[in-house]
Amino acid sequence: TSNWMFHCYMLRCADGSYYVGHTDNIDLRVDQHHAGRVKGYTFGRRPVVLVWNDRFQTRDDAKSAERQVRVCPDKIEAP
């Protein structure tokens, strides 16, 4: 198994806005956002596109990255 179990990610929404979150299953979570199974910010802004994600060993590290990206999104590096 991988030591990198958690992700911080950024989605670009259909209206041009961005959403930042964290998860332990990036593929499932993006699919959930895209399908409208996540009620909240992205629900009315579909379709969404994954534009960035990074992997972390702990959920706390992923949450910390999420907070940092929300404060200063221009500091992330595109893949």
Image (spheres, grey):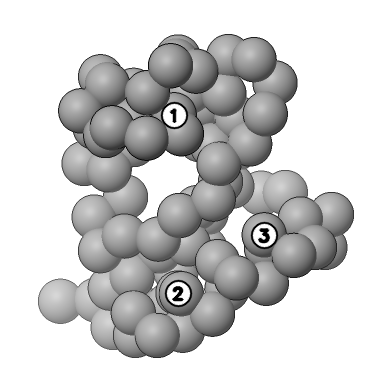
Mark nearer the N terminus (2 vs 3) = 2
Instruction: Residue at 40%, 85% (x, y): give it.
Output: 60
> Residue 53: x and y, percent?
52, 54
> What residue is shown with label 3?
70
As helix, strand or loop, the secondary structure at mark 3 comes to helix
Q: Can you say whether 74 is above or below 31 in the image?
A: below
As helix, strand or loop, the secondary structure at mark 2 comes to helix
Badge nearest the viewer, 2 or 3: 3
Q: Can you say whether 46 is above or below 33 in the image?
A: above
Left or right side of 50 for 12: right
Q: Amino acid at mark 2?
A: Ala
Extreme residue in the front direction: 40
> What residue is shown with label 2?
62
Instruction: Residue at 46%, 74% (x, y): give it.
Output: 63
As helix, strand or loop, the secondary structure at mark 1 comes to loop
Instruction: Residue at 60%, 30% (x, y): give it.
Output: 12
Which disc, if any, is residue 73?
none
Instruction: Find the distance from the CA under tag 3 to the CA under tag 1.
Output: 15 Å
Instruction: Residue at 44%, 29% (x, y): give it.
Output: 42
> Residue 52: x and y, percent?
59, 47
Q: Are marks 3 and 1 in contact (CB under 8 Å)?
A: no
Q: Residues within 10 Å of mark 2 (few under 14, many from 20)?
A: many
Which disc, if any, is residue 42?
1
